[in-house]
Image: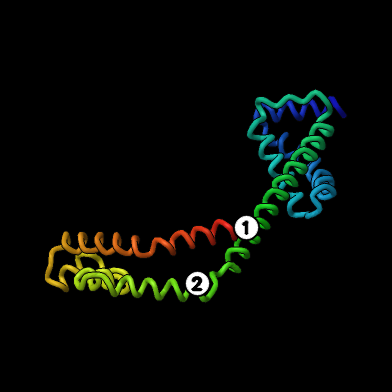
Amino acid sequence: MQIIDNQILEAVRFGDEAAYERLFRAFYPRLCGFAATLVVDREEAEEVVQTLFCRLWEQRDTLEVTTSVQAYLFRAVRNASLNHLKKVKIRDAYKSHNLTTMKQNHEFQPDHAVHSELRQALEKAIAELPEQCRIIFKMSRFEELKYKEIADKLGISPKTVENQMGKALKVLRLQMVEFLSLTVFLFTHVC
């Protein structure tokens, strides 16, 4: 049998598709059965064996078999199955971690009182902006208009809109600094 195996393997090395097909037909069912005992799922087992045979064909010219072809193929399926299980384990751990993280982030919602206080402080800070600054800020942030659209509506240049938005954001940052530190504190202690 070893002589026949070696002849088939030599033919495969030289690109003989018929020899490759004979090798595939001779071992595929048994290798799938063996892989199924390791990875449990029959479809995944078939995928492991098919991938192995594809790789065998792609790397046929560098293939070195020191044992029988059967021993080589079963060892290769065993290694491929174990690698597959490692990948599945890593993938499942990653999914589990992501689900846990998403659940924790979804469950985290700032205290209603803090949220309400933040909203009131923001409304107060916006109300204290100079009139043109306030109008431009509201059009940009609440109506979601672009600077050019705001400029056209107010009859001013886009550069003026840009300058007024910069001024508004600077003032709001200064007035809302205490809430920024609270937000950073909450996120660093919850996550």
Label 1: how many residues lie within 10 Å, few (<14), some (14-19) or many (20+)?
Answer: few
- Residue at image mark 1: 98
Find residue 26 and report its image quarter.
top right
Label 2: how many residues lie within 10 Å, few (<14), some (14-19) or many (20+)?
Answer: few
Residue 67: percent from left, percent from top = 83, 26
Reply above or below: 120 against 45.
below
Q: Is 163 on the left or on the right of 46, as rendered?
A: left
Q: Is 160 on the left or on the right of 27, as rendered?
A: left
**In the rendered structure, which amino acid carries the disc numbered 1?**
Asn
Residue 117: percent from left, percent from top = 45, 74
The coloring applied to the image is rainbow
Secondary structure of the residue carrying numbered label 2: helix
Tell me the number on the disc at residue 155. Answer: none
Q: Nearer the viewer, mark 1 or mark 2?
A: 2
Of mark 1 and mark 2, the one earlier in the sequence is 1
The front one of 142 and 79 is 142
Task: Classify the position of the N terminus by image quarter.
Answer: top right
Write the residue at 60% across / 62% down: 102
Residue 124: percent from left, percent from top = 34, 74
Write the residue at 70% across / 54% down: 92
Q: Is 155 on the left or on the right of 142, as rendered?
A: left
Write the residue at 29% across / 75% down: 127
Q: Is 165 on the left or on the right of 32, as rendered?
A: left
Tell me the number on the disc at residue 114. Answer: 2
Task: Classify the position of the C terminus by image quarter.
Answer: bottom right
The front one of 11 and 136 is 136
Residues at marks 1 and 2, CA–CA distance in whole angstroms: 28 Å
Find residue 83 and report its image quarter.
top right
Secondary structure of the residue carrying numbered label 1: helix
Find residue 99 and report its image quarter.
bottom right
